[in-house]
């Protein structure tokens, strides 16, 4: 039996189509991207997180001379948020990435597979979907209404 999967996403051609809070998150992610520590890849990623109480936190990718010891912007940021506010729900996550030498043609940068898995852990834990946005610096933005939309057949604690 063949079955099909379908996901919906929104596409914004530039930031003028975003709401005020979305634009604020975009700006905070871009600011955080400037502080990324990415001397090996020269690929800078920033991430901002909106909590249910309206607070916004941000972070970026952190690399290491022992390459696998580094961490993506999404996990650096969300692990910090979860460590400090374990009982506050996450409403939105905004990711902005691109090479240090940025070109207009760079497309929106989607979270890597490991980040999708890590973010789904918190979406499952809080039992509420998280809006996820990803963009390049050129203002094109993609939005999905849940992290799990980006990872069909995800693994979570229900299987343990
Ligand atoms: N990176 C992120 O921070 N987030 C992603 O989802 C994709 C990749 C980082 C990891 C590494 O520091 C650099 O981008 C190049 O892969």
Image (cartoon, rainbow, N blue to C red):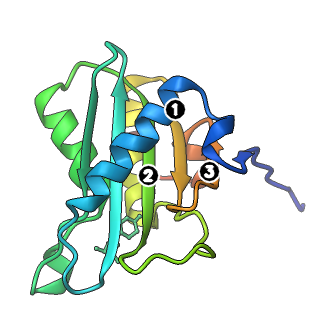
The CA distance from mark 1 to mark 2 is 11 Å
In the image, 33 versus 72, the foreground residue is 33
Give me the residue at 22% from left, 87% from top: 40
Compared to residue 126, the image places residue 43 above or below, namely: below
Q: Which residue is mark 1?
A: 22
**Secondary element at image label 3:** strand
Between discs 1 and 2, the one toward the N terminus: 1
- In the picture, the quarter occupied by the C terminus is top left
Query: Residue at image x 42%, y 36%?
Result: 25
Q: Is the CB of mark 2 within 8 Å of ligand 1?
A: yes
Q: Quadrant of the N terminus?
A: bottom right
Rendered location of residue 143, percent (x, y): 62, 43
Q: Is residue 86 visible?
A: yes
Looking at the image, is mark 3 or mark 1 earlier in the sequence?
1
> Residue tagged by mark 3?
141
Dot 2, how many residues are within 10 Å of its Cα: few (below 14), some (14-19), or many (20+)? many
User: What label sits on residue 102 in the rendered view?
Assistant: none
Q: Are marks 2 and 3 in contact (CB under 8 Å)?
A: no
Comes first in the chain, label 2 or label 3: 2
Q: Quadrant of ligand 1?
A: bottom left
Q: Secondary structure at mark 1?
A: helix
Q: Residue 120, can we see it? A: no
Asked which quadrant contains residue 16, the reply is top right
Verify CB contact (< 8 Å) between mark 3 and mark 1: yes
Mark 1 against mark 2, which lies toward the viewer? 1
Crowdedness near tag 3: few (<14), some (14–19) or many (≥20) residues, C-alpha within 10 Å: many
Q: Which residue is mark 2?
A: 95
């Amino acid at each position: 039996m063949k079955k099909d999967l379908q996901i919906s996403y929104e596409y914004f051609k530039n930031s003028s189509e975003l709401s005020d809070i979305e634009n604020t998150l975009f700006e905070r992610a871009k600011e955080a991207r400037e502080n990324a520590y990415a001397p090996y890849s020269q690929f800078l990623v920033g991430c901002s997180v909106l909590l249910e109480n309206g607070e916004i936190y941000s972070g970026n990718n952190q690399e290491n001379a022992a390459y696998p010891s580094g961490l993506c912007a999404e996990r650096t940021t969300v692990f910090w948020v979860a460590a400090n506010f374990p009982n506050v729900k996450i409403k939105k996550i905004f990711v902005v990435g691109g090479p240090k030498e940025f070109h207009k043609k760079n497309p929106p940068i989607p979270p890597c597979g490991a980040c999708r898995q890590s973010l789904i852990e918190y979406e499952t834990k809080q039992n509420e979907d998280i809006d996820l946005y990803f963009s390049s610096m050129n203002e094109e933005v993609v939005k999905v209404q849940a992290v799990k939309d980006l990872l069909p057949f995800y693994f979570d604690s229900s299987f343990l």
